[in-house]
Image (tube, grey):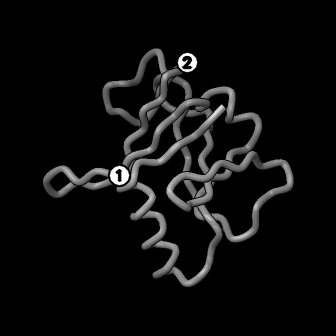
Amino acid sequence: MAITLTQKAANHIQDYLNRRGKGVGLRLGVRTTGCSGMAYKLEYVDTPDDADVLFESFGVKIFVDPKSLAYIDGTELDYAREGLNEGFKFSNPNEKASCGCGESFSV
């Protein structure tokens, strides 16, 4: 089981945590929503939950709740800028389909 970051994603997260002045890492999870059933959710973590599963990539801690892990195990998180748009990109080997708008996926 693993959740990984690219170097660009790790740099972006660490830069944001430094500017924010607090936080120990990033929480990655899923929620039920959208056309295809699930959407990724991200939040910065100040205090980890006892039940979180911890991964570390390029020195950045990634916290995942156990329920979400079954849907995102093996995911690599990247950070990309394309023209005026920028944001996180998910490469999830469990994803079977995604909606046309790219906001949700199914496994």
Image quadrant in which the N terminus is located: top right
Residue drawn at x 55%, y 84% is: 21
Indicate whether 68 appears above or below 23. above
Residue drawn at x 32%, y 32% is: 101
Q: Earlier in the sequence, mark 1 or mark 2?
A: 1
Query: Please, what is the three-letter code of the amino acid marked with disc 1?
Result: Tyr
Q: Nearer the viewer, mark 1 or mark 2?
A: 1
Q: Position of residue 2 (x, y in %)?
A: 61, 36
Q: Residue furthest left?
A: 83
Looking at the rendered structure, which numbered label has been put on residue 79? 1
Indicate whether 52 appears above or below 49. above
Q: Quadrant of residue 16?
A: bottom left
The foreground one among 7 and 70 is 7
Looking at the rendered structure, which numbered label has been put on residue 107? 2
Q: Position of residue 54 (x, y in %)?
A: 71, 50
Query: Please, what is the three-letter code of the amino acid marked with disc 2?
Result: Val
Q: Position of residue 26 (x, y in %)?
A: 59, 58
The foreground one among 45 and 24 is 24
Residue drawn at x 51%, y 80% is: 20
Q: Residue furthest front?
A: 58
